[in-house]
Amino acid sequence: MSAATAAPGAAGARRTRRGGGLVGFRPLLKVSMHQDVRNIAPWVVLISALSASSILAYAWIFPDQSDRVALSTSLGANPALSLIFGPARDLMTADGFNAWRAGQLGAFFAGLMAVLTVVRNSRANEDSGQAELIASGVIARGSRLAVAVAMATIGSIAIGVVCFLVTIACGGGITATAILSASFTASGLVFTGVAAIAAQLGSDARTASSIGIGTLGVFYVLRGYIDTSSAADWVTWLTPFGWLEKAGPAIDDDPWPLLLAVALAVLLVATAFALQERRDFGQGMVAQRPGPAEAGLAGNVWGLALKLNAGSTIAWLIAFAGLGLLFGTLATSIGDIITDNPGVARILASGAASASDLTFAFLATILQIIAIIAAVMGVQVALAVYAEEIDFRVEPLLAASLRRHTYLASNAIIALVGPALAMVIAGTTLGLVAHGRDDTIATGDVIRQAVVTIPAVWVLVGIALAVVGARPVVRLAAWVGVIATFGLTLLGPTFNLPDWALDISPLRHVPNVTAPDPSWASLGWLCLIAAALVAVAFAGFRRRDVI
């Protein structure tokens, strides 16, 4: 290489050393935002719509005082909703209803957006080789992480600003909406820091995403457990979501807990930059174990599918066992919460239902929430089929003697059996712990309820398999099915939706095994629908082009 050719590179290196750790930050941020704005914008729209729709729906569905009292009674009769949405402290005003319905859920979505954005623009670029190409120019190593953090920060601020403006336009109160919107931004900032650290720990982007999303999920479940149990008030401070809850939109309107979240975010980001200085490019602080010397299970397509999904599946199953253990401890405290509700006390006094009936209804709702999470597990496995395809790993396999339907079957079995095992494990641990704390709850009933919920989960996984197999361009429909089921199952009855709308959710057709005459025929229909969706997946995958 001539001196003339080498000169620009040497000059660039000198400029990099003189410019400090963020050389090239601005141009890289501009290009990255242009490319990634289409991934961030839907999160802004989703969270803003969640808040604004709460204000609009409240005035439309609960216009009278009697309607609002009935709402408070119905929510008090099902404390399982506190696991997802947090405690309902003020349902007599639109802002209070918005704080309950959108507060914790919006904060979770903001955190998820931050995790995905940071990992996608940091470790994912290293895995794909884009980061190495960028690093060949005049850019400091710290600039890439700084850009990823800046993009997640911009997205978090955009969520807060847009949500505030849209909600105010729909009739929300200024102060309450400002605190609520700021809590979304604070959540995004905190998990920007979490994701930045996860990007340094994980051996690849997938591992980093798992660490970040896993941390997000643990904190969210812990917050739900604390809100539903009779734990002391100070325990709420153990999770960042508890800090956001302490801000009390529409009740206390206290911004100080949000400042604590911002301080934590700054500390986490600083830690991430310190870790980055100590790890090798393309590697994680937690080293990846070398593969076996022989193919072993991966010697055939069935073993390969199992090998690729074994780690995540085991982690999921452990998590489901933990959920069953955790939620099972709520069985006795739920009885106290239910009987303390005046409306429910009148129902019990009338003899229309017993306390044990309401407790089992709570456990059945818990199993519905677990079923939705199990569906997420299956959908991820189904979508991974297309992810392998666009990374050009499927075509070499199919170029040999491997048939398409065999390859798809190896992954479809894991996508269907994994969630089924998760439901059985969660139901078993939930039933054992609940029976240990309340002997009126039969362990067998809880396990049977978990088992009869499996066909509904298969329907949601079947949707994912169908779109991946037949038309992967609309693979977003896989997540739409899960989200729609979540909304219709947990919020549909609260909003007095018509029966035809509620019937769209497959969980609506799961019978209660303790009912005098359970509707077993509905399980057959769910199995037939799931089988039809799987058949569509195989027929479509056999006919469509493979990348």
Image (cartoon, rainbow, N blue to C red):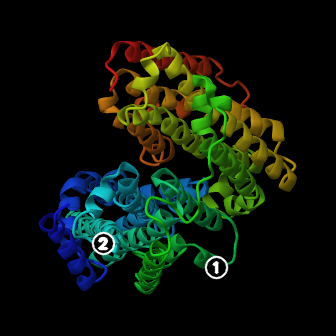
Which residue was labeled with disc 2? 143
The residue type indicated by label 2 comes to: Ser
What residue is drawn where x is 37% and y is 32%?
392
In the rendered structure, find residue 497 and report the number of the disc placed on it. Answer: none
Above/below status of 435 relative to 159:
above
Which residue was labeled with disc 1? 233
The quarter of the picture where residue 353 lies is: top right
In the image shown, does 231 or 478 lie closer to the viewer? 478
Give SS at disc 1. helix
Q: How many marks?
A: 2
**Mark with earlier residue (1, 2):** 2
The residue type indicated by label 1 comes to: Asp
Q: Tell me if residue 9 can be seen.
A: yes
In the image shown, does 65 or 149 lie closer to the viewer? 149
Q: Tell me if mark 2 has few (under 14), some (14-19) or many (20+) residues whose alpha carbon lies within 10 angstroms of its own.
A: many
Left or right position of 271 against 189: right
